[in-house]
Amino acid sequence: MNPANRLLLGGFLTLAVVMGVGRFLYTPLLPLMQRDYGFGPDIAGIIAAANFAGYLAGSILASFVPAGPARRRALQFGLVASVATTIGMGLTDELAVWLALRGLSGIASAFAMISAAGIIAEALARVGAEAKLGWVFGGVGTGIAVSGLLVHAAAPALSAAGLWIAAGLLCLPLIPVIVVEVRDRALPAQTRRHDPRRRVPRPLPFWPLLVNYTCEGLGYSVFATFIVAIVKSRPGLEAMGDWVWIIAGLAGLPSCLVWSMVAERIGFSNALACAYGAQILGVMLPVLSGSAPAALLAALLFGGTFMAITVLTMPLGRHGLGGRGFAVLTAGFGLGQMLGPLVAGFLVAGDADYNVALAASAAVLALGLAALLAAIRLRPSPA
């Protein structure tokens, strides 16, 4: 395997471990945890919010880590802490400890993801192969699909606690592989013929883009937290819950590459608007129909857009605010995704139901799309 592919594989495995499992395993395990421990949607939302709060804090802290040995140590810390906190979730039934573990898990996933992405993106940029970074983000979808399959296959034999431990132990052997492969490398030069039809991202006005991306964080996080619990709570669809999450993961595997190719043809902002439209439809489908096909199509649309929206947004806003655009956009997204499950959990614990929570999150996504369209209109015409 050549050095570029080894680097990409290491990044792929990093995101599978710290995001697909460490961050999103909670979604398929939530119904089992509620069954085993008896808590309601309000507590479920608080636990999810703790993880997202940790991710927000970790993203801010990771932005101060310099390149070089410090960044590699941040990656190693993130990997070990992510796996350790996943296993730790199965060793306690104390809510306060769960909140601490999920908060630390969020910090760990941010450190590992940002460090790995930075190392890989810089190595690829030096040889003009930035487009290959999309392969790395496929690891998130793979981790989601694998963790969903684990829960589906092992739930009859293992409790929720046992599944947390099993998932962490499965990730453990990948740590040394990642540590060896994800490092500063000199890659062979790439030969890519210039395509005059290939579109490049043109920055958008920053403040409406920040509103847009904050709405994405809030809107997507409700579906990403509760969709398995929602589907399993519906009569006749109990067996579909795990498959909804597995399909979301499989759809996420190629999504960044597919949407990047679309963006190079129709423009990044246009592709981003189309991705929002597809995601809004995916979030609303379980509200409009309680059928199995609607749930599966919702998973396909959601899984096929939620990571791609991040990949398309960053080149449109990362240079804003004097180069601080990436950090500020990430903070807005992190704040939104922390509030989403928290508010939705308390809504459902009160007089509302999951349909209200999903419809409200779709409305927030529509607001984000409106802000994006406003940013496109306000953008100066190219010279």
Image (cartoon, rainbow, N blue to C red):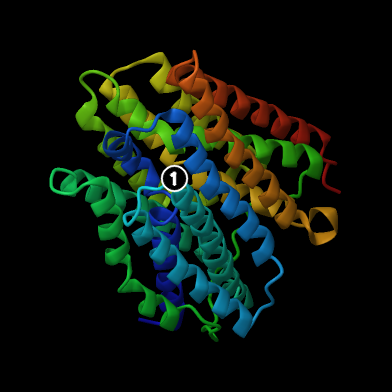
Residue 318, image x, y percentages: 73, 55
31 left or right of 134? left
Q: Residue at x 44, y 21 (%)?
A: 354
Q: Which residue sits at x=37%, y=36%?
A: 300
Label 1 packing within 10 angstroms: few (<14), some (14-19), many (20+):
few
Expressed as whole percent of the image width and height from the top left, the position of residue 258 reads 46, 49
Tell me: residue 134, above or below residue 340: below
Q: Is residue 375 above or below residue 54?
A: above
Horizontally, residue 224 falls left or right of residue 67, namely left
Q: Which residue corresponds to mark 1?
A: 95
Would you place residue 299 above or below residue 185 in this image?
above
Q: Is residue 370 above or below residue 133?
A: above
Q: Does residue 271 appear anywhere in the picture?
A: no
Viewer can see residue 165 = yes
Q: Position of residue 305 (x, y in %)?
A: 49, 41
Q: Residue shown at 51%/81% (left/top)?
A: 183
The picture quadrant where one finds residue 29 is top left
Quadrant in which the N terminus appears: bottom left
| Left or right of residue 154, residue 273 in this image | right
Choose between 178 and 259: the one closer to the eye: 178
Q: Residue at x 49, y 35 (%)?
A: 45
Instruction: Name which residue type carries label 1.
Output: Leu
